[in-house]
Image (cartoon, rainbow, N blue to C red):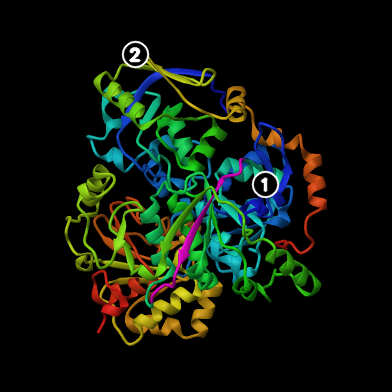
């Protein structure tokens, strides 16, 4: 019987397999940031253990960093960042600190350096590690105990998840993005729909996505509960990788490409579950509730609790969000717009937002936060920052920013945002804050009107 | 890791689905670099509501959390497990857990117990009717017992053994250092390094 992409990559990384035990899996790349690593380094120190392969480990500062120039004002945040610096120096890990040209959100910098490649296993103490699966590797988030385990052994014991194919047929209509697609998928299968699975996104609409779009889709796999999301590598993948600083060169490149091509799921491979979705029927999608599964087409209304699967949860969510069932989503007024994060903080996302904002004015507080310093540099070379500034938006330094509000970029209680990030949980962007997840295009159009809006609605 | 064999204690019914880790421990609490003191952050936003179940004195000192489906979704923060443990919880019972949360729990010795939704609701109702009700979570027998009722739960043998012995994963893995070294010698030559 044929094997799936996930099965091929998994098998390639099994160090040890024993009856009744989880597989011991080799980890090709370990990404680290300041929030989930300090206790892991402490653990190593207490046990007197070194990092087994520091050269397969890379660190960045992202969650706590301010997005305006200057030092970190919060002393607790500053201590956390300084702790990472000390740990990286002591254990010999390459770090991209604030101000470094390579600094950025952990899931943006791996792909941009060409460190994220097909067929690899990649982990990080961060659930959105699933992003890297867009290149055709197995990438998943881990907790701090596992971070310590990978540092010490470069392996992880794990049971192989089941496989799920999400077949996306047809083509995304104009104005409908990868973000709309993944929000629609999560609404369809639910926040627990992917639990226990590695999802492979397949089909015509997926093949047509750019690497940026594929990363947006894989990024939010975790919001459907999936362990990981992946997409088979193809010409789009190779094109993106070629020439990046850590991509193979010469004969290595040719050998790598040949191997990467062999990774696609075999024709006769069988998935444990198959979900089908028609891309051509999709329209811009937004969330109305407090988990990423509580979403609906922008053209629809806030649902009534009794029309949803979990009426009690909907009632709670509507109360928290300050929304009334039956209200058209286009009439929901927002105070703040955030464009950024590891979901939508890449160059293509900024271009899309700039295209909408060109020659227009924003009426909300609007934060544009590039996902990395390199994305920032490229956007400035293309003049996008001038478009944003002319429209009245704020052009910031790279970091996680308002995606989780660990730095000063937060919502106030009751404040409402349209955000290109990935989580609309209660308080995620600041205590009492209300979040609507949207695409960069919808975020930009919303900034212009002050209400949830698609670019097509603008005159 | 703290070993877990049998634990008897009182239960807190948390009748909510999709309790994400941002609720269990909001991000502001994650700035600490130590492993202690997270109990203060446990459900800190929800605890501001005097009506929240953890604020009910009847449940003070309870050590088993009985929650709705999809407990622990979202962020991979292990701080969520530390906060629950440091607050005094030894086990969480729910119809379904998010994968990363469940993994983190078993690394730390907080027992995640999956029971059918109807059983979880019965337990919640029982703990609501009588907050002094004692519940036994028995990992050795793979059973939850209360008021004459018994419900079996599943957990794989390996994880159960590790939890019952309180074994540290890293120590176990390092017994296979030779296998790791052998594997490393066969890795594809083009794989990247970060230097
Ligand atoms: S941008 Fe948001 S989701 Fe991504 S790593 Fe940062 S905090 Fe996590």
Q: In terms of image quadrants, where is residue A458?
A: bottom left
Give the answer, above or below, for where B80 lies relative to A406. Answer: above
Report the front residue among A232 and A316: A232
Q: Which residues are magenta?
A: A159-173
At x 78%, y 55%, the residue is B187
At x 50%, y 37%, the residue is B102
**Spot occupied by residue B132 in the image (x, y as percentages of width and height):** 30, 16
Q: Residues within 10 Å of mark 1 (few under 14, many from 20)?
A: many
Report the front residue among A23 and A248: A23
Give the answer, above or below, for where A396 lies relative to A309. Answer: below
Give the answer, above or below, for where B151 lies relative to B40. Answer: above
Considering the image in quadrants, where does the N terminus of chain B appear? Answer: top right
Choose mark 2 or mark 1, whichever is in front: 2
**Spot occupied by residue A264 in the image (x, y as percentages of width and height):** 63, 62
Residue under numbered circle 1: A151
Query: Residue A167 in magenta?
Result: yes
Q: Is residue B156 visible?
A: yes
Q: Chain of mark 1?
A: A
Query: Residue A307 in magenta?
Result: no
The reply, left or right, for residue A111 in relation to residue A361 is right
At x 35%, y 24%, the residue is B11
Residue under numbered circle 2: B147
**Spot occupied by residue B148 in the image (x, y as percentages of width and height):** 36, 12
């Amino acid at each position: 019987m044929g094997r799936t992409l996930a099965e091929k990559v998994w098998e390639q990384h099994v160090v040890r397999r024993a009856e009744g035990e989880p597989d011991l899996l080799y980890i090709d790349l370990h990404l680290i940031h300041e929030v989930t690593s300090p206790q892991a380094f402490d653990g190593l120190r207490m046990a007197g253990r070194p990092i087994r392969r520091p050269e397969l480990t890379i660190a960045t500062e992202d969650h706590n960093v301010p997005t305006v120039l200057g030092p970190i004002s919060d002393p607790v945040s500053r201590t956390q960042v300084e702790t990472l610096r000390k740990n990286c120096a002591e254990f010999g890990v390459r770090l991209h600190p604030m101000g470094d040209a390579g600094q950025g959100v952990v899931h943006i910098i791996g792909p941009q350096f060409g460190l994220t490649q097909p067929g690899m296993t990649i982990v990080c103490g961060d659930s959105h590690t699933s992003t890297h699966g867009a290149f055709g590797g197995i990438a998943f988030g881990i907790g701090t105990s596992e971070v310590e385990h990978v540092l010490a052994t470069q392996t992880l014991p794990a049971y192989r998840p089941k496989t799920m194919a999400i077949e996306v047929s047809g083509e995304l209509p104009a104005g409908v993005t990868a973000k709309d697609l993944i929000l629609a998928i999560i609404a369809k299968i639910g926040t627990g729909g992917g639990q226990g699975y590695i999802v492979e996104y397949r089909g015509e609409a997926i093949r047509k996505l750019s690497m940026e779009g594929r990363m947006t889709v894989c990024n939010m796999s975790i919001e459907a509960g999936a362990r990981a999301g992946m997409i088979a590598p193809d010409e789009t993948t190779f094109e993106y990788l070629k020439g990046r600083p850590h991509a193979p060169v010469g004969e290595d490149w040719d050998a790598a490409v040949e191997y990467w091509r062999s990774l696609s799921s075999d024709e006769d491979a069988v998935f444990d579950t198959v979900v089908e979705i028609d891309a051509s029927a999709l329209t811009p999608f937004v969330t109305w509730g407090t988990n990423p599964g509580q979403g609906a087409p922008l053209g629809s209304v806030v649902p009534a609790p009794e029309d949803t699967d979990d009426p009690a949860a909907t009632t709670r969510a509507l109360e928290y969000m300050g929304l009334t069932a039956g209200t058209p989503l286009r009439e929901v007024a927002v105070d703040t717009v955030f464009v950024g994060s590891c979901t939508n903080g890449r160059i293509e996302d900024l271009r899309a937002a700039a295209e909408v904002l060109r020659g227009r004015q924003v009426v909300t507080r609007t934060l544009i936060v590039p996902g990395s310093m390199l994305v920032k540099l490229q956007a400035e070379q293309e003049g996008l920052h001038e478009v944003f500034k002319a429209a009245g938006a704020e052009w910031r330094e790279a970091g996680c920013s308002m995606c989780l509000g660990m730095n000063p970029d937060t919502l106030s209680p009751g404040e409402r945002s349209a955000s290109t990030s990935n989580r609309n949980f209660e308080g995620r962007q600041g205590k009492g804050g209300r979040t609507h997840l949207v695409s960069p295009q919808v975020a930009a159009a919303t900034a212009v009107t002050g209400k949830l809006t698609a670019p097509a609605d603008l005159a | 890791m703290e070993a877990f064999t049998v634990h008897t204690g009182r239960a807190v019914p948390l009748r909510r689905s999709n309790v994400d880790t941002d609720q269990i421990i909001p991000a502001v609490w994650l700035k600490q670099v130590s492993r202690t003191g997270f109990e203060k952050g446990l459900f800190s936003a929800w605890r501001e509501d005097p009506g929240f179940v953890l604020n009910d004195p009847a449940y003070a000192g309870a050590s088993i959390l009985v929650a709705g489906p999809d407990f622990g979704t979202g962020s991979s923060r292990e701080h969520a497990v530390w906060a629950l443990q440091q607050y005094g919880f030894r086990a969480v019972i729910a119809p379904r857990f998010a994968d990363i949360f469940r993994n983190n729990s078993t690394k730390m010795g907080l027992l995640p117990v999956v029971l059918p939704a109807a059983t979880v609701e019965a337990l919640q109702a029982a703990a609501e009717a009588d907050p002094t009700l004692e519940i036994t979570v028995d990992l050795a027998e793979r059973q939850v017992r209360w008021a004459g009722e018994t419900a079996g739960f599943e957990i794989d043998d390996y994880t159960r053994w590790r939890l019952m012995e309180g074994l540290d994963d890293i120590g176990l893995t390092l017994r296979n250092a030779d296998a790791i070294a052998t594997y490393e010698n066969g890795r594809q030559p083009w794989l990247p390094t970060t230097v």
